[in-house]
Image (cartoon, rainbow, N blue to C red):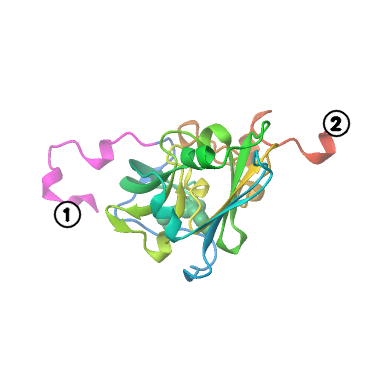
Amino acid sequence: MANDRPDLAGAPTDASRHIPPGQHLVHGWPVSHYGSVPRFRPERWNLRVFGATAERAERVWTFDVLTDLPRVTVVADLHCASGPTTLDHEWYGIPASAVLDLVPPAPGVTHVMAWAEYGYTTNLRLSDFTAPGTLLATHHNGEPLTAEHGFPLRLVVPHLYGYKSAKWLRAIEYLTEDRRGFWEERGYHNIGDPWQEQRYSHQEKPGEGPVPSDQRRPS
Ligand SMILES: Nc1nc2c(c(=O)[nH]1)N[C@H]1C(S)=C(S)[C@@H](COP(=O)(O)O)O[C@H]1N2
Ligand SMILES: [Mo]
């Protein structure tokens, strides 16, 4: 693919870019997800923040209200845990840390669950959710997200594998203990750091995943 680009001759190429172990570079931007692409119905759409909030009440934002929230631009690569890496995505949207500022968590919140259309979920440590690069993106490379890439809103967690970047985001749930999301329940690593190649759940070390319920002490 890169051979048809004469500008790459002798210059540092994409192929020399440092990408995580076991990943391969892919040009363009393939679409990757489980199931079908949901249709956006603005009148029914909302973003919910629920679970262990400080006020013990949930917050619901309509689509219009999102434009009042703070915005940030983040440029980052995207690493799918099945191998492909795509480079230099310019994301624009709401910094995830702003959600915590606007809806404070109760003391004891350690993780969040991101909920997407059709019940797709992915869990994150609070520190990964509030990391400076994590955002709720509305735009990509200056354009609104396309339907297949998550319009109208997707989570982007650039420092973790792609399955943490939930497309068609609909809710954030505050958790006082960790719980596995969709792919995390289906053999993928609970944390998913591509630089440590945390691809599969069988690689998890003690403390990297939720304590199985049968090993929990009665509280
Ligand atoms: N709702 C939802 N979000 C999802 C997925 C999914 O199946 N459903 N797949 C994830 C995976 S595995 C990857 S690699 C990225 C891919 O995002 P892209 O299609 O925009 O490249 O979306 C993530 N977000
Ligand atoms: Mo993926």
The C terminus sits in image quarter: top right
Label 2 Cα neighbours within 10 Å, binned few <14 / some 14-19 / many ≥20: few
**Residue type highlighted by circle 2:** Arg
Q: Which amino acid does the dot numbered 1 rest on? A: Asp
Q: Tag 2 or tag 1, which sits nearer the N-term?
A: 1
Most foreground residue, 109 or 123: 109
- The answer to which image quadrant residue 110 occupies is top right
The residue under the point 54% across, 32% down is 127
Question: Separation of disc 1 and disc 2 at Cα?
Answer: 60 Å
Q: Position of residue 62 (x, y in %)?
A: 50, 60
Q: Which residue is mark 1?
A: 4
Look at 53% across and 69% down and name the residue there. Answer: 44
Secondary structure of the residue carrying tag 1 is: helix
Q: Secondary structure at mark 2?
A: loop
Q: Is residue 63 magenta?
A: no
Span colored in magenta: 1-19
Q: Quick check: 174 above or below 121?
A: above
The residue closer to the viewer here, 6 or 140, is 140
Of residues 126 and 89, the one nearer the viewer is 126
| Res 160 visible | no
Q: Which residue is mark 2?
A: 217
Image position of 188 with respect to 18: above or below: below
Quarter of the figure with the N terminus: bottom left
In the image, residue 133 sits, relative to residue 168, either above or below, namely above
Q: Is residue 10 magenta?
A: yes
Q: Nearer the viewer, mark 1 or mark 2?
A: 2
> x%, y% of residue 210?
70, 37
